[in-house]
Each structure stands twice: as structure tokens, then as C-alpha cells.
Amino acid sequence: MQGQSQQQAYDRGITIFSPDGRLYQVEYAREAVKRGTASVGIRTPDGVVLAADRQVSSSLMEPSSVEKIHKADDHVGIASAGHVADARQLVDLARRRAQGEQLRYGQTIGVETLTRAVTDHIQEYTQTGGARPFGVALLVGGIDDGEPRLFETDPSGTDYEWQAAAIGSNRNEIQEFLEEQYQPDADLEAGIELALRALGSADDEPVSAENVDLATIDTEDETFQTVSQERLESIVAEIDQPEESDE
């Protein structure tokens, strides 16, 4: 009984390490991320691509109300996987941090600086009693002085920089696809196609344009732009065409 009660203490207490050095609540938060629909980030010399699977649970739901990609600043976008409400709180934090930088110093915030501000906030919730970790992972993409940057945040409060990354469900399969297909010198259009093919790779079938959110931040004007539904449908049709011609 004593061993069982100790195990429950490690399980419930966010501030208590288990004997093997684990924080179970952080691991549970990572499991919540795995249950969220996938998001993908691609870094190219011409800019950053963020794409997200926004599957709707009912035909009566307005697809536009399911937000997986957010504008944090003119030059920064964020894609999420996991609890949507947690993602919204962190995106709001990122927006306030970016606005504060502009008001105080009259300049845009660096992508890495913004990511660190978010992960510092996330980390606080891994050592605070009476709170739980954020059950969400983010892909933060943007332009720093003409250079594309792409970062991932983890529920532990750790950030990683990537050339191409996936978060959410089927991450391992999508990441393996990206490792095989990613080309460092690809242009922005090729990055968009790769992101869409990566989202569909886990199911071995083309992704549906109506179930995808996609945005780009290019190095030319350093501006966050969402890709319209019509353009997505055109790109998806072009991706599918080679497979149709082979049959």
C-alpha cells in the first residue's frame, strides 16, 4: 500500500520527481499532444510554411471556426497540436510579447526570442503546485533579418530549431517522410507541396484541401499570409495528378 501511495504522489504532483527522474504530468501533457491532429512546418530559403490538419467533427460545424494556425506578429506564425484552448492562451501570450517589443523598442521581435518567451512561460507550469502543464506543442515560424527560422515547443518548456518538423498525431510517420523528402534548397512552392504531402503521408492518401490550414511567411516581404481555399484545392489537384496518370 505504501508503494502504491508513493506512486500516486509522483503521478499527481507536478512538482515531484519520480525515483527515475520523471515528471509524470509532463509526460501526460505530451500524450495530449499526440492525440491532437497533426501540424507541419517547413523551412525553405524563400520562407517558412506552416500547415495543419483541421479535421471537423461534424458536417454542421463551420470549418473556419477550427483554428490551428495563428498570426503572432506580421512576420511570425504559430501552428499547434494538442489542446486548442491551451494553444490559444500561448498564442495570446506570444502576441502580447511581440506587441510589447514593438512598443518598447520600436522593432519587431526575433523569432527565437519570442519562442523562448513562450517556452519560459510553459516551463513555469512544470514546477508550480496547483497547476498543470500546457497540453499543447507549437511550431513557431518566421523571418529574422531575412533569415527563415522554425522552432518547436514542448510541454516541458524546451524549444528546438528545425528545418522541417511535425507535431501531433502520427508524428513519427510524418517526420520520417520529411526526413526522406526534404530538400534544403527547395523554394516556397515546393515547401507548400511537401507540407501537404507530409500531412497525407500517415494515411497513405492525399490530404483534403478543405481539412487543411496553410500559411506562409516569405523572406521577400516578411509577412504572414494564409493560403486561400481555392489555391489549396489547385495545389492538391496538382499533387494528385501524377498518381492519376500512372493508373
Image (spheres, rainbow, N blue to C red):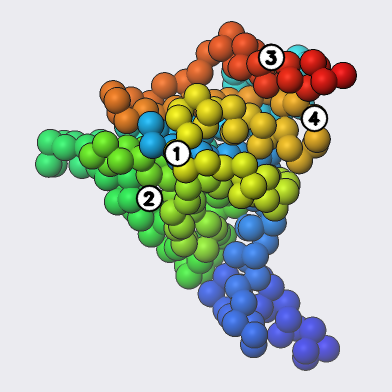
- Depth check, mark 1 against mark 4: the one in front is 1
Query: The residue under label 1 is which amino acid type?
Result: Asp
For marks 2 and 4, the one nearer the N-term is: 2
Residue behind mark 2: 115
Residue beneath the point at 48% across and 70% down: 127
Q: Relative to the observer, which residue lies in front, 149 or 154? A: 149
- Picture coordinates of residue 111, whole percent (x, y): 33, 45
Q: Which of 55 and 212 is in front in this view?
A: 212
Residue corresponding to mark 1: 185
Residue 128 in the image: x percent, y percent? 47, 67
The amino acid at mark 4 is: Glu
Separation of disc 2 and disc 4 at Cα?
A: 33 Å
Residue 79 seen in this snapshot = yes
Q: In this view, does 104 lie to the left or right of 148?
A: left
Splitting the image into 4 quarters, where does residue 206 fall?
top right
Q: Residue at x 72, y 48 (%)?
A: 173
Residue in view at x 76 percent, y 40 percent = 202
Task: Give the crowd class for mark 1: few <14, some 14-19, many >=20 residues within 10 Å.
Answer: few
Q: Which mark is residue 219?
A: none
Say which element carries label 3.
helix
Query: Residue at label 4?
Result: 205
Provide residue 115's location: percent of width, then percent of height: 38, 50
In the picture of the structure, the residue carrying the numbered disc 3 is 237
N-term-proximal mark, 1 vs 4? 1
